[in-house]
Structure formats: structure tokens, C-alpha cells
Amino acid sequence: MFCAKCGTELNGEFCSKCGQNCNQSVGQGQSKVQENVEGKSWSTAGILGLLLGFFGVHSFYLGRTKKGIMQAVIAVLAIIVAAAFGPMFFNLAQNHRMEYGGGFHNARSLALLDAELAMYILGGIILFGVMIWSLVDSIRLFTGSVTIDAKGNPLVPIRNNR
């Protein structure tokens, strides 16, 4: 049996970690003590956070869909900004250069190249921020700061089936 508030395994009526009285009934036949039905692994979530966290895969795994969607949308937008708008400004600068006799001597060509560089840098900064966000999530999972999934079920270690 596990505490519904923090996910710690119970040895008695009160949770040793948060002090919650887990033996009181909540309402119609429900108890504050939960069986670990889902069995989601904190280590699997942490590894997903390290490898694919910038797309929010670990958040989806833990049932935190809003957070996962936010991470995925921000990462995709960062990639679009860097991969689509950067080359677009570069092509505009190239066309302008060809139109006006080669070289990047005039202000418009240089401004377009600066815009290209700004798009690459902006996309990189946003993607770096999402990667740091997922790294912090992974560290929190590995250190035990996150103990329950979105449904309130405690996270468990990987079971050895030998």
C-alpha cells in the first residue's frame, strides 16, 4: 500500500514521509491508501527525459499531457524557426546580392544575413531552454523529488523479473 499524497510505501496508518493519515475514508467506499496499479517507473521516465525530453516524451509517459504538449510545441517551433526562417533569410540575401551585382556591400544584404543569423540563434536558444527544462525534470526524477504520476500512483523502480 502507498500514500496517496506522496507515494511512499506505508508501514502503518500514517505516512512516514509526509505524515498523512492514510487510513481515513474519503467518501463512498474510497480510501486514501492506493494500490500501485499503473506501476510506472521513475527510471524509465528519467531516461526518456534525458533522451527525448525536449519533445516532452517523459511527461506523456507520466500522464502529464499538458506539460508534454507544451514541451513538444515549443521544441517544434524552435526547430521551425531555426530550420525554416534561417534559410529563408539567407535565400533572400543571396537573391538580393545577385540582383545588385554580387557581394554583400549594401545594407539590405547585410540586414538579411543578420536576420538569418538571428533566426538560427533564436531557435537554438529556445531549443536549449527546452533541453534544460527536460534535464531538470530528469534530475528531479532520478533524485526522487517526483514520486507520483499524474493520476497519483507512486512511481516504482524497474523490477528485476529473475
Image: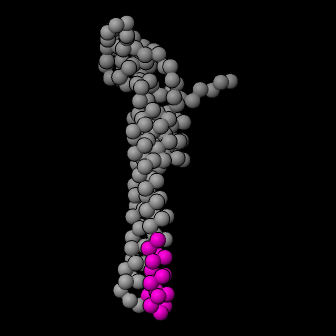
Q: Against 3, is 149 above or below? A: below
Q: Say which residue appears at 45% left-offset and 25% top-offset.
A: 154
Q: Which quarter of the image is occupied by the C terminus?
A: top right
Figure quadrant of residue 34: top left
Residue closer to the observer: 30 or 143: 30
In the picture, measured across the screen, residue 27 lies left or right of residue 98, that is: left
Q: Is residue 35 visible?
A: yes
Q: Say which residue appears at 50% left-offset and 19% top-offset.
A: 37
Q: Which stretch appears magenta?
A: 88-104
Residue 72 lies, in percent from the top left, at 45, 47
Asked if the magenta segment contains residue 96, the reply would be yes
Residue closer to the observer: 82 or 151: 82
Q: Say which residue appears at 53% left-offset and 41% top-offset.
A: 47
Magenta residues: mostly which secondary structure?
Answer: helix
Residue closer to the observer: 97 or 79: 97
Q: Say which residue appears at 46% left-offset and 60% top-offset.
A: 80
